[in-house]
Image (tube, grey):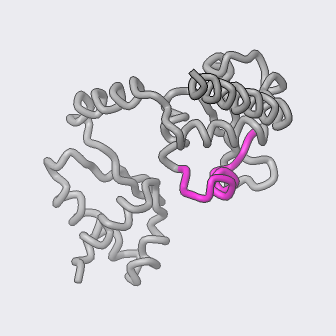
């Protein structure tokens, strides 16, 4: 069984975002006053670990310690130097073709959690998040001008439509089949 500070640490790590103190009390089934004691105990146990507890009046979050900035910077630079990858390209396509999408909408289309892909796209400046007009609790992601430049288009209207993509795919398949027949007959 986890100690209360370890349980709090696990909750904060798993959430990946700030947790309200009242929510922590509810999740750990403790009184609001006990949350402060747990936060002090966790802060003490994190001392020197490269992770710190960031606390406001109402919320708490785990973050990297300021002393870890140089090594974290290297990680971020290496992440940005890699290709986008299939998952990030799928996420970018969903956002582009839906002219903006929430994480839930992207997840539904892709059938998997897209948090990491969205994070990578945000870090690279290819998408931006704004408050969703229909539901203020959600973030709606849209393409940036950097993404349009990356895709080689001036506006979302220039994206190829399904019919164009199907025709292009059919032409590529026919060309490949013709090349196979030609090489087989030689």
Residue 144 position (above or below residue 163): above
Q: Is residue 122 left or right of residue 137?
A: left
Identify the residue at image location x=66%, y=50%.
Answer: 106
What stretch of residues is rendered in magenta? 100-114
In magenta stretch: residue 122: no
Query: Is residue 122 among the parts visible in the rendering?
Result: yes
Identify the residue at image location x=49%, y=36%.
Answer: 85
Quarter location, residue 79: top left
Image x and y of residue 61, in percent: 39, 54
Query: Is residue 130 among the parts visible in the rendering?
Result: no
In magenta stretch: residue 104: yes
Identify the residue at image location x=16%, y=52%.
Answer: 47
Q: Is residue 185 left or right of residue 116?
A: right
Q: Nearer the viewer, residue 89 or 142?
A: 89
Report the label total.
Answer: 0
Residue 88 position (above or below residue 49): above
Q: Is residue 141 left or right of residue 2?
A: right
Image x and y of residue 118, in percent: 55, 42
Quarter that holds the C terminus: top right
Identify the residue at image location x=46%, y=61%.
Answer: 19
Q: Nearer the viewer, residue 138 or 22?
A: 138
Determine the residue located farthest toward the front in the rendered image: 185
Residue 56 position (above or below residue 125): below
Image x and y of residue 76, in percent: 36, 30
């Amino acid at each position: 069984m986890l100690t209360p500070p370890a349980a709090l640490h696990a909750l904060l790590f798993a959430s990946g975002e700030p947790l309200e103190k009242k929510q922590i009390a509810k999740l750990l089934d403790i009184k609001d006053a006990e949350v402060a004691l747990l936060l002090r105990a966790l802060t003490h146990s994190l001392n020197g670990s490269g992770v710190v507890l960031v606390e406001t009046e109402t919320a708490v979050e785990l973050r990297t310690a300021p002393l870890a900035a140089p090594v974290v910077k290297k990680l971020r630079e290496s992440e940005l130097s890699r290709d986008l990858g299939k998952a990030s390209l799928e996420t970018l396509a969903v956002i582009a073709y839906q002219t903006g999408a929430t994480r839930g909408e992207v997840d539904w289309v892709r059938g998997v959690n897209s948090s990491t892909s969205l994070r990578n796209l945000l870090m690279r400046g290819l998408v931006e998040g704004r408050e969703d007009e229909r539901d203020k609790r959600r973030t709606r992601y849209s393409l940036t001008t950097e993404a349009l430049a990356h895709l080689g288009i001036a506006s979302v209207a220039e994206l190829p439509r399904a019919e164009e993509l199907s025709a292009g795919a059919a032409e590529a398949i026919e060309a490949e089949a013709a090349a196979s027949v030609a090489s087989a007959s030689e």
